[in-house]
């Protein structure tokens, strides 16, 4: 860890990595709180795994047809939004088939991505790294893209705070108040999709669900209001991403996996500690 802090002021890529973690943490804190409260973790998981289709397609067209402007994150964003809308519409229109559609989107997205990767000439090491995160490889262009998406998520997430709050806690009450539950539910899923794309750069497709849910779950144990949960979740996510970077840098471990292990350890410690406390102080 000391090696990380010693080189942080000298290495630009470490500064980009920390800044990326902070930016992503803000979106994750806001949307992760909604996801945990609304209990749509599995939907977020399906969206996360479906982005491989967009990334694979983007890399294929970039390599085969020389579309140099088509960054994998652009493809990921399109795939994530399409998946969110499909799942959302089916969830609203046919609830009995929701689990099946979530599983189908999850599997089909991954399968399409693998097919595109297989057909793309050359070894796509940089694309495969998105499976497990590549926060140390974030470029200045990607940082600007992440900042822009982060701003969109945070502004919309906070602008419609009351509407999302009503939709997450009591749909019937929201309808009685004249709130379009269907619209705000789809909007929330789209914001979740954008957040997933942001998190892919930090911990990868495989571990996105953990970073969306664990900080929010820990924050929920110390919060009584949703906005408090968002603030604490953001702070915890910053702690986990920065701590994961620092802990992994010296031993040369995967930063994404280290971040999730740290988040999981804190979650388990807090959950067990709070249970023991309640047992001793009923």
Image (cartoon, grey):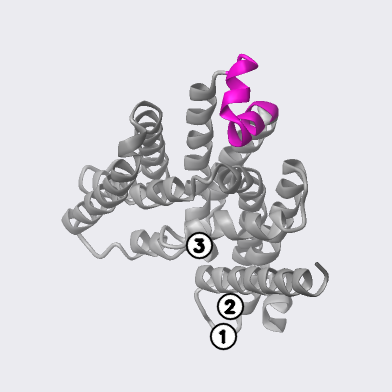
Q: Is residue 92 magenta?
A: no
Secondary structure found at label 1: loop
**Vertical arrangement, residue 152 with respect to residue 268, above or below:** above
Q: Residue at x 35, y 59 (%)?
A: 127
Looking at this view, is 187 or 243 the one in front? 187
User: Would you name the residue on which mark 3 appears?
Assistant: 203
User: Would you name the residue on which mark 1 appears?
Assistant: 251
Looking at this view, is 129 or 161 the one in front? 161
Number of numbered tags placed on the structure image? 3
Residue depth check, mark 1 versus mark 3: number of the one nearer the observer: 3
Determine the residue located farthest toward the bottom in the rendered image.
Answer: 251
Determine the residue located farthest toward the right in the rendered image.
Answer: 281
Magenta region: which residues? Answer: 162-179
Q: What is the quadrant of residue 255 in the picture?
A: bottom right
Secondary structure found at label 3: helix
Q: What is the quadrant of residue 9 in the picture?
A: bottom right
Q: Residue at x 36, y 48 (%)?
A: 51
Q: Is residue 174 magenta?
A: yes
Looking at this view, is 20 or 280 the one in front? 280
Which quadrant of the rendered structure holds the C terminus? bottom right
- Specify which label sits upstream in the sequence, 2 or 3: 3
Determine the residue located farthest toward the front in the rendered image.
Answer: 282
Q: Residue at x 53, y 59 (%)?
A: 202
Does residue 36 appear left or right of residue 114 in this picture? right
Does residue 198 appear left or right of residue 262 in this picture? left
User: Would you name the residue on which mark 2 appears?
Assistant: 248
């Amino acid at each position: 860890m000391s090696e990380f802090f010693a080189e942080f002021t000298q290495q630009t890529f470490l500064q980009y990595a920390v800044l990326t973690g902070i930016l992503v943490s803000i979106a994750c804190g806001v949307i992760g709180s909604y996801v945990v409260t609304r209990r749509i973790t599995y939907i977020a998981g399906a969206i996360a795994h479906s982005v491989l289709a967009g990334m694979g397609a983007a890399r294929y067209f970039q390599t085969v047809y020389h579309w140099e402007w088509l960054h994998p994150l652009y493809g990921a964003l399109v795939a994530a939004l399409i998946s969110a809308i499909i799942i959302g519409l089916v969830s609203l229109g046919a609830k009995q088939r929701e689990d099946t559609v979530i599983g189908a989107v999850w599997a089909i997205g991954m399968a399409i991505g693998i097919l595109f990767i297989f057909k793309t000439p050359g070894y796509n090491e940089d694309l495969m790294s998105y499976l497990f995160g590549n926060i140390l490889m974030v470029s200045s262009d990607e940082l600007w893209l992440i900042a822009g998406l982060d701003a969109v998520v945070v502004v919309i997430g906070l602008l419609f705070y009351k509407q999302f709050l009503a939709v997450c806690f009591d749909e019937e009450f929201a309808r009685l108040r004249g709130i379009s539950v269907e619209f705000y539910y789809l909007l929330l899923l789209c914001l979740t999709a954008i957040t997933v794309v942001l998190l892919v750069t930090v911990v990868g497709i495989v571990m996105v669900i953990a970073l969306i849910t664990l900080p929010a779950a820990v924050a929920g144990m110390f919060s009584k209001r949703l906005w408090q949960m968002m603030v604490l979740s953001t702070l915890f996510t910053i702690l986990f991403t920065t701590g994961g970077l620092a802990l992994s840098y010296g031993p040369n471990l995967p930063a994404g996996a280290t971040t999730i292990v740290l988040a999981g350890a804190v979650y388990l410690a807090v959950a067990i500690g709070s249970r023991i406390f309640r047992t001793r102080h009923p």
